Amino acid sequence: MSHLPEHQVDNLVTRINRIEGQVGGIKKMIIAEKPYNEVLIQLNSARSAIQGISKILLEARADHSLMNVSDGASLDDELKQLREVIKQYNKMN
């Protein structure tokens, strides 16, 4: 991972824990037969949180690639790996 604070494992795990809480809340809302619009609002919130983590991971991979190239790694190899991450990121959007 990158050296930026938002890219650190602890930060990402905290975000995942929040999302787990959101999903648990959504499950309870469905069981309680809450109005659909309220459930959809929470689903959109969880989706947005997941997309936020995806963005952080994409940024971290880009940072990692740049650091590797500056340390002598193959530019072609790093670009190939970065393209694969971008491809996966784009599937989410």
Image (cartoon, helix red, strand yellow):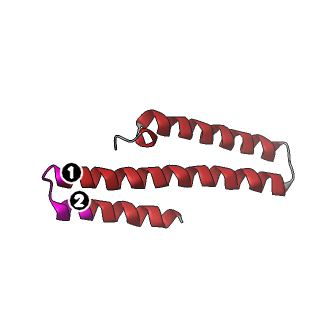
Amino acid found under the numbered disc labelled 2: Glu
Q: How many marks?
A: 2
Considering only vertical position in the picture, is 78 above or below 21? Answer: below
Queried whether the magenta region covers residue 76, the answer comes back as yes
Say few, some or many: other residues with alpha carbon within 10 Å of mark 1 (under 14 / 14 to 19 / 20 or more). Answer: some
With 29 as the anchor, is 86 left or right in this view?
left
Tell me the residue at 39%/64% (across/down). 86
Residue type at tag 1: Asn
* Picture residue at 48% right of the left edge, 40% below the top: 12
In the figure, is residue 38 to the left or right of 20? right
Give the SS element for disc 1. helix
Q: Which residue is mark 2?
A: 78
- Viewer-side residue, 60 vs 46: 60
Give yes or no for residue 53 being in the magenta stretch: no
Q: Quadrant of residue 37?
A: bottom right
Q: At which x and y percent is residue 55? A: 48, 55
> Residue 38 at what x, y percent from top left?
82, 52
Residue 48, placed above or below residue 5? below
Q: Mark 1 against mark 2, which lies toward the viewer? A: 1
Q: Which residues are magenta?
A: 70-79
Residue at 86% from the left image edge and 47% from the top image edge? 33
Please identify the quadrant where the C terminus is shown: bottom right
Q: Quadrant of residue 75?
A: bottom left
Residue that label 1 marks: 68
Q: Residue at x 69, y 56 (%)?
A: 44
Q: Are marks 1 and 2 in contact (CB under 8 Å)?
A: yes
